[in-house]
Image: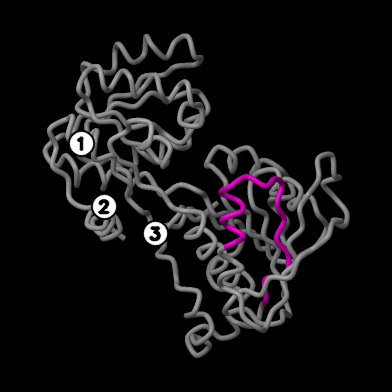
Amino acid sequence: MLLRRTRTIPVAAFACAATAWSGACAAGLTTVLMGDESAPYAEFVQQLRKMQEAGSHLDLIRLTAGQPASGPFSGAPSAVRPRGAVPADAPVTMAVGVAAARSAIERPGQDPLVLAMLSRIDYESLKTNPAMRHPARQIGVLLRDPAMADQLALIDAVMPHKRRLGVVATGESAPILNELQSAAQGWDLQVEFAPDAKSLAAALRVLVPRSDALLILPDRIGDDQAATLAVLRAGAGAGLPVFGASDGLVRSGGLAAAVSTPAQLAQQALALGQKLAANIGPRGVVVEAATPATVRVNTTVARGLGLRLPEERELTERVTAIR
């Protein structure tokens, strides 16, 4: 499996780059599968609609609970015409979220497949499915979170002389933790494991005195509101800034986060689908972290910690400059 951290290529570029990428515009994105109507997924599809122009037909299919994973999908499709796509010789299927991804990989066919807005843990649970290794099918996976290198670049921009970074991990965090450790050259990572909610407080008691800042991983702790709040309270009690990968964390009291919005993810997913359809890049499953990252800052928390931070736009530029 390949993990690639690449710049998002503007969608409009695909309409005019045929000389550089022969056939890159010869494929149209024809089917988008959604498993639920949550706000991020709705924003993702809305962005596709904003990019619409005459040329290529896209069917939005909302999967219903209990719908079989294999066989043809049913539903009332709605037409969306994304910019840069034309009627396809090799149509692309895009699945938005893990429920839709499970259905899509079991669906018969050889059309290129993009699994979008997955957490790293979602992807780890899917990649053991034999259907993910179909020899005749190109599969692209777009993770919903920026790479760990982006998170470290943000922390470095905010606290350039601090290197002790505290992390609480769970048993399922291993892929994310491995990525973090690989990117954290020159950092002093302090890692404690909390296999369950009861052990989280004990892990934080050990971790906090050894840390200059805390990082909440996009794992079971980062996805659980109560666990996230426990880390935020521990950081606030010790005067430690807390970083993470979600807007919600910043709103709840985290100092800053490198995130990728659903609209940004929609543009990147469309570009990834077009590259797969045009056979650009390596064969097999291609995994991309979310790019570009957008920095969110809680200015109230910054003032409480006595920190004067650059504007969000400047921090965003610093984070993305590492690519």
163 displayed left or right of 192: left
Q: Which residue is mark 2?
A: 312
Query: Mark 1, mark 3: which one is toward the viewer?
Result: 1
- Please give the range of residues in magenta: 28-46
**Label 3, residues with CA under 10 Å away: few <14, some 14-19, many ≥20:** many
- Kindly state the secondary structure of the residue where label 2 is placed: helix
Q: Which residue is rendered at x = 30% and y = 11% of the image? A: 205
Q: Which residue is rendered at x = 28% and y = 55% of the image? A: 316
Earlier-in-chain disc, 2 versus 1: 1
The amino acid sitting under disc 1 is Ala
Question: Compared with residue 18, is residue 258 higher up or lower down, i.e. above or below?
Answer: above
Q: Quadrant of residue 60?
A: bottom right
Where residue 225 sits in the image (x, y, percent)?
48, 26
**Label 1, residues with CA under 10 Å away: few <14, some 14-19, many ≥20:** some
Q: In the image, which disc is placed on residue 302?
A: 1
The amino acid sitting under disc 3 is Pro
- Kindly state the secondary structure of the residue where label 3 is placed: loop
Distance from Cα at disc 3 to Cα at disc 2:
14 Å
Question: Compared with residue 95, is residue 49 higher up or lower down, i.e. above or below?
Answer: below
- Kindly state the secondary structure of the residue where label 1 is placed: helix
Q: Which residue is rendered at x = 42% and y = 14% of the image? A: 200
